[in-house]
């Protein structure tokens, strides 16, 4: 299994989105996602979040919120548990990312991007300002075949 973080950084009613176009072998190739990545040994979710956001964007998060836990089950990869965050305060200057292109996208246009179907589910919850949730999504290839959500 894998443990990851993902963050949607907010500014001026926009999310900072990463268009994954740079890596040759990338399960997210061509998709738009938030920023984040895999835990390093001994890291807490918050430590992973802060490190990954800084590495990918050059930004240091000041105010962030743990919004949900997403479980990805896929027939072509290991199960992934993702800690999902939003952040609305940060400092630093945005830098280029070696995994793709960073772009501020209006929140109401994010669902129009080329995103995973499972991401569409949790992005709607983020946009609705839902309280903490747990979401399980199951894929066969690139197709979402089942999902289940629990809200608190």
Image (spheres, rainbow, N blue to C red):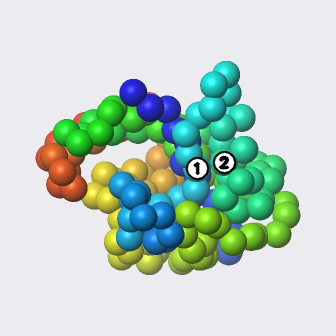
**Contact? badges 2 and 1 (CB < 8 Å):** yes
Measured in 3D between alpha carbons, the distance from the residue under mark 2 to the one under mark 1, in whole angstroms, is: 5 Å
Identify the residue shown where x is 66% and y is 58%: 56
Q: Is residue 34 left or right of residue 137?
A: right
Identify the residue shown where x is 44% and y is 77%: 109
Q: Is residue 31 left or right of residue 22?
A: left
Q: Nearer the viewer, residue 1 or 13?
A: 1
- The correct choice, above or below, for 128 with respect to 52 in the image is below
The answer, for residue 57, to whether it is visible in the render is: yes
Q: Secondary structure at mark 1?
A: strand
Callout 1 environment at 10 Å: few (<14), some (14 to 19), or many (20+)? many
Can you identify the residue that label 1 sits on?
A: 36
Figure disc tally? 2
Q: Is residue 36 left or right of residue 133?
A: right
The answer, for residue 69, to whether it is visible in the render is: no
Q: Secondary structure at mark 2?
A: helix
- The correct choice, above or below, for 34 with respect to 148 in the image is below
Q: Quadrant of residue 98?
A: bottom right
Identify the residue shown where x is 82% and y is 69%: 93
Which image quarter is the N terminus in? Answer: top left
Identify the residue shown where x is 54% and y is 77%: 106
Which image quarter is the C terminus in? Answer: top left
Q: Pick whichever of labels 2 and 1 is earlier in the sequence.
A: 1
Q: Quadrant of residue 45?
A: top right
Q: Nearer the viewer, residue 114 or 111?
A: 114
Callout 2 environment at 10 Å: few (<14), some (14 to 19), or many (20+)? many
- The correct choice, above or below, for 62 with respect to 147 in the image is below
Can you identify the residue that label 2 sits on?
A: 52
Percent x, y of residue 65? 65, 43
Q: Is residue 115 left or right of residue 88?
A: left
């Amino acid at each position: 299994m894998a443990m990851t973080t993902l963050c949607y950084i907010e500014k001026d009613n926009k999310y900072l989105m990463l268009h994954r176009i740079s890596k040759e072998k990338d399960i997210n190739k061509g998709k738009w996602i938030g920023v984040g990545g895999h835990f390093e040994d001994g890291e807490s979710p918050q430590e992973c979040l802060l490190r990954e956001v800084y590495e990918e964007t050059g930004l240091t998060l000041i105010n962030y919120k743990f919004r949900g836990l997403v479980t990805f089950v896929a027939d072509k990869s290991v199960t992934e548990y993702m800690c999902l965050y939003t952040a609305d305060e940060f400092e630093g200057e945005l830098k280029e990312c070696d995994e793709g292109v960073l772009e501020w996208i209006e929140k109401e246009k994010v669902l129009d991007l080329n995103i995973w179907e499972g991401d569409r589910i949790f992005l709607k919850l983020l946009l609705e300002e839902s309280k903490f949730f747990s979401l399980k999504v199951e894929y066969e290839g690139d197709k979402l075949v089942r999902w289940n959500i629990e809200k608190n």
